[in-house]
Image (cartoon, grey):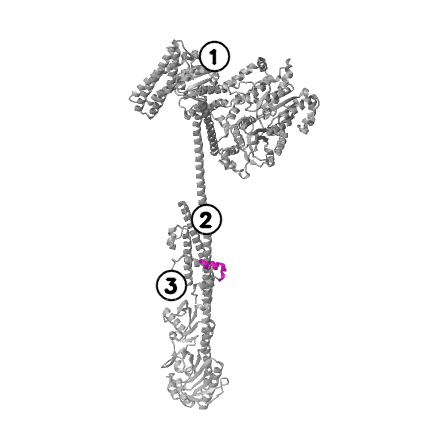
Amino acid sequence: MDVSQMQGQLIDYTASLFREGFLDDQFTQLQQLQDESNPDFVFEVVSLFFEDSERLLNDLGRALTQQIVDFKKVDAHVHQLKGSSSSIGAQRVKNACVAFRNFCEEQNTEGCLRCLQQVKQEYFLVKNKLESLFRLEQQILAAGGSIPMVE
Amino acid sequence: MLPTSSSSSSSSVLLQVPALQLKVSEKSMAENTERAPSVSFGVSPTQNRPTGFCLRRFCNQLCGCLSKESKNLPPCRKHIQKGEVQEDEFPYPSAQCLSSYYSVFVARLAIMVMLAILIGMLTILTWHFTTVYTTKSINSLAYDLRFELLQRPILRMWNILNSTAEITNAQVKLSEYVIRRYDKTVTQPQQIEMYEVMRNVTWALFASRKALNAITISYRNGFVQAFHRDHRSNNTFYIYSDLVNASITGTHMLNDLSTDHGWNDPSANGNISAIWYREPLDPVTGESTGRPRTIPPDDLINIAGLSEVPDGVASWHVAVSKFIDSPLLSAALPVWDSSNKSIVAVVGVTTALYSVGQLMRELVEFHSGYMYLTSQEGYLLATSTNAPLLRNSTTGPELMMAVDSEDHVIRLGAEWLQSTYGNKFYPNQEVHVENVKLGHQKYYIDSFFLKLKRLPMVGVIIIPRRYIMGKVDERAFKTLVTLISASVCILVVGCLCILILTNGVSKEMKLRAELISHLDARRRAEASSNYKSQFLANMSHELRTPMAAVIGLLDILICDDCLTNEQYTTVTQIRKCSNALLGLLNNILDLSKVESGKLVLEEAEFDLGRELEGLVDMFSVQRINHNVETVLDLSDDMPKVVQGDSARVVQIFTNLISNSIKFTSSGHIILRGWCERPNTFSDTMKLPLDQKESSSALKTKLKQHGNHEMRTSKKDNRIVLWFEVDDTGCGIDPSKWESVFESFEQADPSTTRTYGGTGLGLCIVRTLVNKMGGEIKVVKKNNPGTLMQLYLVLSTPVDGTRQQCSIDFSRHGLMVLLALNANMGRVIMSQWLRKNRVHTWEASEWNELTQIIREVFQASSTTPRNGFMTQCSTSETLRYEELKTHHVRSSSIIIVVDVGLLDLSTDIWKEQIKFLDKYHGKAKFAWVLNHDTSNAVKMELQRKGHLMMVKPLYKAKMVHILEAVIKERAFELQQESPNASRAPQGDLHECLEIDPIHFDVASSDDSDTFETGSFNSRRGVLQIGETSREEIITQDHKNLNNRLSEFSQNYSKNKNIENPRQIWQTSCDIEDSTCTSTYNRKASGLPELEVENSRWSGQNHRDSTKAIDGQKSLKGLCILLAEDTPVLQRVATIMLQKMGASVVAVGDGQQAVDALKCKLDAEKYRSSESPFWDGNTRFQTLLQECPLFDLILMDCQMPKMDGYEATKAIRNYEAGTGSHIPIVALTAHAMSSDEAKCLEVGMDAYLTKPIDCKLMISTILSLTKRMA
C-alpha cells in the first residue's frame, strides 16, 4: 500500500468520522495543537481520555449497581466524562453523557443503567475508531509519509 | 269659641312669621302629606283641636323626614315605606360605603331629634313664662275683684240694716218721749193730740229716709199709725186705723199692759174689727192729697205688732209683701212706758231690699257675672238678675230658695254649692272656687258669710271665667299656637337645612369614597404597571442572557474557518440582528430600571470630552453614508474631568445623536456643550438659545469670564453643563415637543415605517437627564430641524485641576489653513482657533485651497495680500500684520486638508498630492481621512510623511496637530539636526491607534441605536463577547484595518493600555529617550513600516487571524491551571503552551490554593527555603520555573475542593495583601446562573468548555493586561 493511498484513506476515514458524528471540531483543534514540540499530542490526549474514561466507566458501573445509588457521585462522574469527551471531540459520547445526566437528575436508576450501556457502547465505538485512526497514522508514519491535515 | 279649622288657625297664627317661611312650611306640609300617605287622616278625637293638629302635623313632618331619609336608604326599606318601586339613585359598591351611609343617616336623625327637643323645650318654656305668670297675677287680681264685688252689696246690706236700725231706734226714742208726755192724759182730745204729734214725728222721720218702705206704730190699744211709700208708683200713704174704736180699747189695753204685763196680742182680735184708712200724702210735704179711704187691714203692709217683740228686744226678719216683689227687711222694736215696765207701742220699720238688688245689678252690669244674697237658710234676699225673688204660693208670696231661682246660673251655682258644701255654712266659712263648670262654662264662685246677729247672710258671686281669664286664655292659646307653629316651621326649616347640609356631607363622603376607590384603583394600576415594568425588566434580563449566548456563539461561528462565504454573510446578518435585538432589550431594561427606580447612577470620574469625542467618532462612522456631518463643539470652559455615570451620559448623547441622525438626511448635527455656573443659571435660561448666533455669543461671553468664575465654583463642585443637539432633520412639530419624551412615542407615527425604532430612546434620555438633575426640552429653532437642549448637573472632582487648553498657541505664531468640505465643522473649528488667536484661513474646495496656498506662500515671500484678509476676522488684522512680518521665522503654517477635497474617482488625486507636496517644507500637512478612504491614498500620504487622522476633526484632534507641530519645531530647533533633508514629520509617522472603545462602538454599525456604554459596563460573558466582537468587527471593516495612523488623544493613553495591541507609542513620547529608537526605526526605512503594516492587515485578515493571533500572544505569562479531568488538563496545557505561556497544572482546587500560597510565600521568603515546598515536591520544579502566576484557570467542578471554594479561599488569602490574581472560571455548565456564581465568588471571567482557543486568549489577555 503506498503512502499516498494510505494518506487518502486516512483523510477519508477522518472525514467519515466527522460525518458520522463520532468526532467534532474539538478534535480538529487538538490536531492543530499538535506540532513539532508535541508530536504525539493527539495520541497522548486520546490515550489519557481512554484511561480516564475506562476508570470512570468502571466507577459508574460500580456506583449504579450499589443498593443505594449515590446519584451525586454518578453525576459527577458523568460530568467528568462529558468534559473529557467533549475535550477530545468525542461528540457522541458527549451527547450520551448529556442524556445520562438528565436521568441522574431524575434519579432514574433504570435510565442511568440504560445510558451507561449507551455511553459504553459509544465509548467503545469511538475508541475503536480512534485506535484504527491511530493505527493508520502509525502506518503512514512507518511508511515514511506525513500525516495530512484534514482541510 | 276656639278655632276649629286647622288651616285657618295656623295661617292666622303664623301671621307673625315671615311669609316665605310660611310658604315653605305649607309646602313642606303639603309635601309631607303627600310623602307619607301611610299617616292616617281619618277621624280622630283631636281633629278639631289645634294642639292635636299641631302634634299630628309634627308627626307628619317627622314621617316626612323619615320618608325623605328613606329615599336614600336601601331600596327594600324604601319600598316598604313608599310602596312603589324607585330605582336606586346611587349604587353602592361596597358594604363599607353602605355602613357609612347608615351612620350619616343616624347622625342626621340624631341632629333632627335634638333640634326637635330643643325647639320643643324653648316653646314650652316661652309659653310657660308668658302665660302662667300672667294667669297667676290675673288670678290674684280677680280674687280681689271678686272679693270687692261681693263686699259692696254686703256693705250696702249692712248699711241698710244699720239705717233701719237707726230709724227704728230714733222712732222708738221719739215715740217714748211723746208717749211719756201724754202719759197722764186720758182724755180723748189729748189722746188725739198725742197721736197727731206722733204722726208728725213719724212723718218727719219717714220723710227723712227715702229708702224706708214703711214705718208703723201700733199702739197698745190697737191703734195703728203707718206711713207707707210705694216705690213703684212713687206714692206715699198714711195708713191708720179707726181712732174712736181704738181709743176706748186702747186705754184699756194700756192699762192691761201696765197691770199684768201680759198682752196676748189683743190687736189681732181688736184689729179685725178696726177700720183701716189710707190717705195718700204728698211725698214732700206730707199734706194729705186725698180723702182717706178704707182698706182692708193688713192689706198693704206688715204692721209690726207686739207679737214680734215678745221679749222686748229688737227683732229682725225678712218679710214679703204682696205689693212689692222684693223681700222686705223689717225691724220691730218695742216702745216702753216711762216706768219701763210695759210696752206701750211697737215700732216697725220696713226697708225694701230692692236697693241691694239694684246695686248688684249695677255691679254686675260692669263686671258681668251673677251675685245673690241668701239668708242662712238659703232664701234668696237679693240677686243681680231680674228673676223674681218671691214665689207665689197658695199662702201668698213667699221667699224662694236660691236653688229654686229662676235664673239658670244662680240656680246651678247654688246647687253646686249645696252639693259641694252641704246645706250648712259654717261661720266664717268662705268659699273661693275657681273653674267651676256650670253648664258649658267655667265660673269663679266665691261666697262670704255675713254674720249678723239676727240675720246671718250668705253672699255668693259667680263670675264667668271668661270674663276674667278670657283674654288671658285666648292670648295664651294664641301664644301657644304661634309658638308651636313657629317651632314647627323652624323645625322643618332646620330639618331641611340639616338634610341639605348632610346631603352635602354625604355627597362629599360619596365623593371621598369614590376618590378612595379611584386612588385604590390607581394604586393597583400603578402596581400592575410596576409589575409590568418588573416583568419587562426580568424578561429583558432573562432574554439578554441567551442573547449574549447567541451573540457569543455567533461570534464563534463567524470565526469558524469552515464557513462558506454565503454562510458567513448570513451569520453576519444574524449577528447584526442579534445585536439590534440586544440593543432593544437593553433599552427596555434601562427604561424599566429607571421606572422601577432601581437605576443607580454611579459616581466615577470620567473624561467627558473624551467620551463625547468618542461618540462623535462613532457616529461619524455611522453617518458616513449619509450626507451629514457630525460636529462636536465643546467650549473651552468645560471641565475635563467630571464625576458621574459616564455610561449613562454617553447613552444620553448616543440616543440623541442617533435620533438626529435617523431623521437627518442632509446637513449637519452639532453637539454643543458649555459650562454653566449655577449663579448665572437663570440668565441663560432667558437667553434665546435657539439662535446660533446668540448662543455662540453667549459662549464667548461665558468664556470670557470663565476663568475667574472657575475659581469661585471650585468650592461647590456642582456644575451645570449645558448641551445642545442641533440637527437639520425633519424637525418636530411644536405640539409634540413634550410628548416625544414619552415612552413609545414618536413625533409622527408614520416615521416608524420610514425610520423604524421603538420610541424608547428619548424617553430613556429624559429619565436619565432627570435622574442627573437636569432637564431636556425641545427648543424653537429658526432653521429647519430640531434643537434639543438639556443640562446636566454633575460634580467635578474636588481636587480636579481644570485642564484648559494648556498651550497658548498664539505664542507659537501658528497659522492654520482649514481645507475642509464640511461647512459647519470648518466654521466652528476656525472660530475656535481664532479665539485662541491662531490665524486661520478657510477653504471648502480644492481650487480655493490651491489659491490660498499660492497666495500665502507668495505672500510669505513678498507681501501680504488682501486676499487672505477676507478670511481673517477684522479684529485680528493687526495681529495678522504683525505676524506677517516675521512669520517666516517664527510661525509655521499648518494645512489641514480633507481627503474629500481630492478627486479620488480618478487618479488626479496623486497629482493633487504632488502639488501639495511642493509646500512640504514650508508647511505641515495634516490630512483628515474618511473611514473609507482607500488604502492607496493612505499609503501615499503615509509615504509622504503627512499627519493623518480620521474624521471628524474636533478640538482635541486639532490640539494634537498643533501640539505635534509645536513639539516638532521645538525638537527641530533643539536637535539642530544636520540632516536637513530628513523631514521632521517623519517622527510623526508613528501610527496611533484608534481608541478601542471608540472603535468597537463605532463598529456597531446597526441602524438602531445602541448605548455603547452599557456594553462596556456589562461584565462576564458580555465582556468576552465584546472583546471577540471587537475582533470580528475589525474584520468587518477591513477598510479600517488598513488605517495607518491616527492621532489619539493624550489622555486616551492610560485607558488604552488594556487593549492588547495598544503598545504603541504616542506622538508625545517622541521627546523622550524613545526618540532615538524611533529614529533608528526611521533609519531602517520604510520596509519595517511596511512589515508592520502588513502584519496589521494580516492579523486582521480573517483566514490568517488564528495563525498570527496564536503566535505566542501569551508569551511571558505564567498560568496556573486547575483542572481535574486529565484530558482537559492536557488539552488546555498544550493550548496555553502553544500561545507561549508557561503552565502549571494542578488536579484540584486545594492544590491550586496551595500552589498559589507557595508562590506568594516564596515571594516573601525568597532567600530561604520555605517549609511548604517539601510537602509539595510535585510542583516544586514547576513552581520554581515560573515566576508569579499571572492568571488562574479554574475548573468549577473538581474533587476535594471545587473551583468556587478555591476562588473564595484565594480571595480570602489575598484580602490583606492588595494583590488580585485574575481567575478565569472553566465550566461546562454554560448557564448564566453559573456565571453569576462565578463572579460572585470573586472570579474575573468565565469560559465554557470545550475551551475556545481564541476566546480564552482574548480573555486572558484582557485580564492580564488590565492587571499589569
Structural distance between the alpha carbons of marks 1 and 3: 128 Å
In the image, are marks 3 and 2 on the same chain? yes
Q: Position of residue A130 (x, y in %)?
A: 36, 15
Q: Is residue B575 above or below residue B783?
A: above
Please check the rendered image and state whether residue B25 is part of the magenta-colored stretch, yes or no.
yes
Camera-nearest label, 2 or 1 = 2
SS for callout 3: loop
Q: Quadrant of the N terminus of chain B?
A: bottom left
The residues colored magenta run B15-28
Of the residues under marks 1 and 3, which one precedes in the sequence? 3
Q: Residue furthest front?
A: B906
Residue holding disc 3: B45
SS for callout 2: helix
Residue holding disc 1: B1166
Residue B507's label in the rendered image is 2
- Provide the chain ID for the residue under circle 3: B
The kind of residue tagged 3 is Pro
Of the residues under marks 3 and 2, which one precedes in the sequence? 3
Choose top left, top right, bottom left or bottom right for residue B915. Answer: top right
